[in-house]
Image (cartoon, helix red, strand yellow):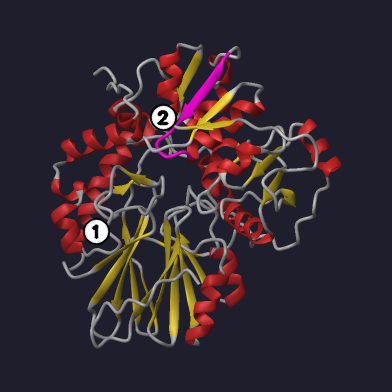
Amino acid sequence: MNDAAPVHPLPGSPLEVHIIETPGLGNRSYLVSDGAVAVVIDPQRDVDRILALLARGRLRLTHVFETHVHNDYVTGGLTLARRTGAQYVVVADEKIDFKRLAISAGDEIVSGSLRISAVATPGHTQHHLAYIIADAATGAVAGTCTGGSVLYGTVGRTDLAGPEHTDRLTRAQWRSAHRLVDAVPDSAAIWPTHGFGSFCSGGAGSGAVESTAGEERRSNTALILDESSFVAGFLAGLGAYPAYYRHMAPLNRSGPGPLPSTPLPTVGPGGLRRRLDAGEWVVDLRPRRRFAAGHIPGSINVDDITGVATYVGWIVPWGAPLTLVGPDEATIVAARQALGRIGIDPVAGHVVVDGPTVNVFDSASYAVRTFADLAAALAAGGPLAILDVRADDEWRDGHLPGARHIPWHDLRSRLDELPADRDIWVHCAAGLRAAIAASLLQRAGLRPVLVDDRWWQVYDAGLRVEAAAA
């Protein structure tokens, strides 16, 4: 189970909250109960975690609420409602392709001892709602499920509806944050869906794992700055977001089904070769140094099961057939589940590799080096290129002179900017993104050298760092 221990927000009250974490996407779902009935807010697609909580507590699920139509994951709301008989509650103003219980700002729903009140909080999306949860008997507010409105220290990003709407939605987000916090007591818990590494978060959050309305009133940038100052700073801090986001809202509006559960076929050497020759994608999930030592030519390396959905969803063309390579069946299963959370269902097969290399046909490899090795190579004067694949803000804070900057997620469309006649030493801040980039370079016929090192080691290596020009 990935749920945290129950939170008891009201002393002497029967209300309790279970937090269901999905660290790979930086999101949380919530199950709120009074000990007999329960409601769920913003469920992920893998609803078995929630069903297990319901069974453990012998709870009857009455309603499934969405704060908004999500842009960063495929919802499990419709599946959960159908499997439990609960009502599926979605904002009335959203155009969707399935039956739901429509809810609007100002509406209230009572379930057992729970009273759920909808508050208009546009900003992250046009029709976003937050839900204030109170004890129906006493009226005491336990907390508010804020979705992509008030997060811990910041608010949800406002640029997902298109650039023509961003300024207007950012101003709406500022007003929504004030409206929501003003509607609850300082003691009310804040339960956001985003903000734990999600790219749906706008700006730097506080890093907190829990908070209250009072704490946010004192520290949240949207609540301590005036509207003009907040908007200017917030818009300046918005970075890139994953390419797969544009597919999420259409999927969620159509009423997505459950995660696929049929076994993945095992792919043999001949079948794998035919798939690669046809331009299909093979993702190798093994540790990056094992991958570098020997791998299937044309495959790409994602050395992070937790974040595999974000990385694959960002760089592999949407809908492209996908084959997974991993060190064991458990890794394959975990990756498939993570990919399914963002709707990457067409996983065509898998290969399990026990050894350090892939012995299904001639393996490819490339060198792994450190920043100290790079310093020595530069001192020797040989021809080489340096590729920095970190994010724009990291590059602006400091980079190696003469390096070319292409964020890792833009690399596939900008490979023609790189030289084919020399080694390309590719680095990020810790090695993971550089490993993805190195595999993409080799897939394109270029000559990568993976710098698997921490960024601060550039100073120990004696390399000079310069900041971007203002």
Task: Give the quarter of the figure containing the C terminus.
Answer: top left
Q: Residue 81 falls in which quadrant of the image?
A: bottom right
Answer with mark 1 or mark 2, whichever residue precedes in sequence.
1
Residue beneath disc 2: 371
Residue 116 appears in view: yes
| Amino acid marked by disc 2 | Phe
Mark 2 element type: helix
Query: Do tag 1 and tag 2 residues touch (Cβ < 8 Å)?
Result: no
Mark drawn on residue 180: 1
The disc labelled 1 sits on which kind of residue?
Answer: Leu
Vertical relation: 353 (above or below) 78: above
Q: Nearer the viewer, mark 1 or mark 2?
A: 2
Q: Position of residue 375 (x, y in %)?
A: 40, 22
Magenta range is 422-431
Q: Nearer the viewer, residue 48 or 349?
A: 349
Report the number of discs: 2
Q: Residues within 10 Å of mark 2 (few under 14, many from 20)?
A: many
Percent position (x, y) of residue 278? Answer: 79, 32
